[in-house]
Image: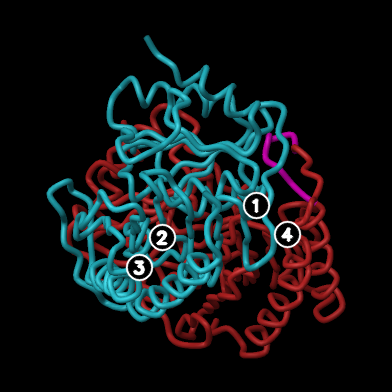
Chain colours: A red, B cyan
């Protein structure tokens, strides 16, 4: 399915509305609650997701909803919206502007549309099946990268990988790459779409963290899969590998494999 | 010496001029040269430093100059300007807007004035002896933080510490801190001055990387020293510890110590 233009325009409006809320709380004193999985959440996360859910419910009442903070409603619907109201809550808390709002639309469980919006920076990537990815309204394109030793590699943190095996796998790629940059969260995926990063490798992510990225990166000429090279979907695990050039995707897959 | 207002106004003009050059090159294809110390440099670094040096030479011909790219002239002068044209060249190359231009003025070898300017974000901290630090023209203030377990800790990268001992020392603080965020370069020091970070711990820095930060952090109520708690000056080593609250400075010093 090519994404209907109506959904693209609606996603832009969702991101506009979310940004208004998020900017109101950025660099203001906000209470930080630690969730069961030890990750932080603020009223800004919750208020933003509530707003996004209510806007979808009003405009497309038959569509499903999945959000980081408030779970799933009608996840079996043909069209399902998926939200991470503030991806990079740690950055948000620490006063850094690279956090983003992720908005995705799934069709039959497959990513159809995605928005990576950075309210504090007023920067937005939007991608959808059948449409070229746009950054600030202009077409975005991944870049060619033939050698891992020249690649810019992004990851939120080298401490995010959980298990010894996954940490070691990441370290193999990091040591082979030209440059490793941390602290990017979803911004790093946008920078792949715009041709400034070549790889992003992450783990311990939820579907709300990565399904919205898929159309942005694919529509810019890149690829994003799990660490076995499989397409990402509702039942994917926690591991993500994104690349701007297929050669980098293949090179990273080889280094990430264990057993 | 309280910093004369004339120097503050001149430093603002220097940062304005540098920002014009840097923004012209940001996210444009630029050649990256690898220096002898393996760090990258671009024409944007070099052109910016040349401009800053020529502006000082024209306005204050008796003042000294120290820059990351073109070395020292008259470093024994009473007043010496010190520049890092692009602090965070890796971020600049990778398309991330957190890199900054650092401008400092030393009086008798001691930091008198400092600017942390972020051309892509259009954000600026300026601090000077005898003046409160300002962010975007408004007073900036560090925050209180009584417990390391609540502290936000920044560092450019966990891989920057070089020796095993220094890496282990950093890891002791990281594991005790509430939150570690990487990929900040000089932005992290600004966020201490504005009360969003509590600690920054770095190594392998040159004097151009840290002397301009000193007045910004001190003028906001914080402190910045080497890892032994000594004041930073022209002959300091490569290690920096900045804190917004004296209790965090003391707690970090204890954990950083070895032998």
Relative horizontal placement of residue B2, taking residue A181 as reference (left or right): right
Measured in 3D between alpha carbons, the distance from the residue under mark 1 to the one under mark 3, in whole angstroms, is 29 Å
**Residue at 41% over, 56% down:** B104
Helix, strand or loop at mark 2: strand
Helix, strand or loop at mark 3: loop
**Residue at 74% over, 47% down:** A41
Task: Provide the residue span drawn in magenta.
Answer: A35-42
Measured in 3D between alpha carbons, the distance from the residue under mark 3 to the one under mark 4, in whole angstroms, is 30 Å
User: Is B208 contained in the magenta span?
Assistant: no
User: Percent position (x, y) of residue B123?
Assistant: 56, 67
Numbered disc in front, either 4 or 1: 1
**Residue at 69% over, 64% down:** B138
Please say if B199 is above or below A254.
above
Q: In terms of sequence position, does the residue under pointer 3 or pointer 4 come before the other?
A: 4
Q: Give the residue at mark 2.
A: B103
Q: Give the residue at mark 1.
A: B194
Q: Nearer the viewer, residue A252 or B242?
A: B242
Helix, strand or loop at mark 1: loop
């Amino acid at each position: 399915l090519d994404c209907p233009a109506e959904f693209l325009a609606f996603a832009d409006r969702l991101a506009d509305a979310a940004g208004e809320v998020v900017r109101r709380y950025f660099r203001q004193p906000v209470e930080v609650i630690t969730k069961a999985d030890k990750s932080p959440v603020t009223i800004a996360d919750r208020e933003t997701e509530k707003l996004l859910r209510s806007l979808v419910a009003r405009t497309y009442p038959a569509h499903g909803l999945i959000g980081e903070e408030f779970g799933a409603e009608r996840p079996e619907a043909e069209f399902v919206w998926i939200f991470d109201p503030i991806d990079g809550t740690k950055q948000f808390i620490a006063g850094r502007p690279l956090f983003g709002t992720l908005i995705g639309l799934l069709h039959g469980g497959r990513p159809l549309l995605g928005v990576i919006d950075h309210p504090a920076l007023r920067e937005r990537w939007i991608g959808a099946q059948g449409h070229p990815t746009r950054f600030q309204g202009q077409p975005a394109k991944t870049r060619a990268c033939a050698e891992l030793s020249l690649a810019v590699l992004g990851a939120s943190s080298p401490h995010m990988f959980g298990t010894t095996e996954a940490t070691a796998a990441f370290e193999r790629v990091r040591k082979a790459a030209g440059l490793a940059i941390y602290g990017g969260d979803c911004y790093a995926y946008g920078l792949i779409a715009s041709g400034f990063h070549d790889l992003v490798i992450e783990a311990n992510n939820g579907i709300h963290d990565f399904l919205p990225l898929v159309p942005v990166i694919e529509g810019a000429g890149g690829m994003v899969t799990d660490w076995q090279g499989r397409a990402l979907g509702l039942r994917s695990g926690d591991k993500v590998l994104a690349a701007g050039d297929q050669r980098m995707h293949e090179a990273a897959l080889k280094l990430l494999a264990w057993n």
